[in-house]
Amino acid sequence: MSDDDLRRRVVAELSGDPRVDGETFQVSAADGTVTLRGTVASLRLKRAATGAVARLRGVVRIADELRVQLPGADRREDEELRGDVREALMLDTSVPTTVDALARDGLVTLTGTAQWHHEREAAESRAASVPGVIGIDNAITLTQTPDADAARELITSAFQRNAVLAADALSVKTSSGGLVTLSGTVSSWAARDQAVAAAWSVPGVTQVDTRIRVVYKP
């Protein structure tokens, strides 16, 4: 696929996504790397744009250079923003009560503990939807007790069950501290995301080092 073809595909995907339709993006493509530039009015829009690009065939890397520029009505003082985020987290039943938040100049740091990575993701997603948030540092720690051998077996089995992953092209290494290292190749950025998600879904995983390469084969 040529760079121009990939760029047109990205532009069409962004234009057809109702979550970001009407936004203006500068899109460039080079050897499978898609770069997004411009400004958006919220972190939610920024995440939606990169998510739309990630699901396209031919994308091997995303360079997200989008900046969040808040409308005046969405700007908050630090304590007010912190209160809004904490309230949003408390109202989401998928976010554990052990999660807290700090805010400074629109940047939110999530702190505390959770048992599962999907709880960390739920907290980040919920915080990203709060008006006034321009960025998130997810510092929530996981408390599951790691078992390296069991984790490796569970991740490998998940790869084998997945319809879009070639399990024999992927390698999984685990450590007693909950670190998982993924390497090998996949055919799309979306497949890479699925491999990472499969690793994070296993109990005891506290960190995923992703060294998977995306090799697009037309």
Image (cartoon, rainbow, N blue to C red):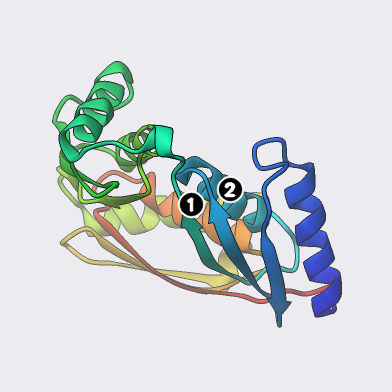
Identify which residue is drawn at 70% across, 73% down: 28
Q: To which residue does mark 2 refer?
A: 161
Task: Assign a secondary structure to mark 1.
Answer: helix
Quadrant housing residue 178: bottom left
| Amino acid type assigned to the residue bearing label 2 in the image | Arg
User: Who is closer to the viewer here, 4 or 26?
Assistant: 26
| Amino acid type assigned to the residue bearing label 1 in the image | Ser
29 over 101 or under it: above or below: below
Identify which residue is drawn at 19% across, 40% down: 78
Task: Assign a secondary structure to mark 2.
Answer: helix
User: How many discs mark residues in the rendered view?
Assistant: 2
Q: In this view, does 180 lie to the left or right of 62?
A: left
Which quadrant, please, contains the C terminus? bottom right
Quick one: which residue is furthest to the bottom in this view?
31
- Please say if the residues under marks 1 and 2 sit with CB atoms less than 8 Å apart: yes
Which mark is drawn over residue 157? 1
Give coordinates of residue 194: x percent, y percent: 54, 52
Q: Is residue 158 left or right of residue 189?
A: left
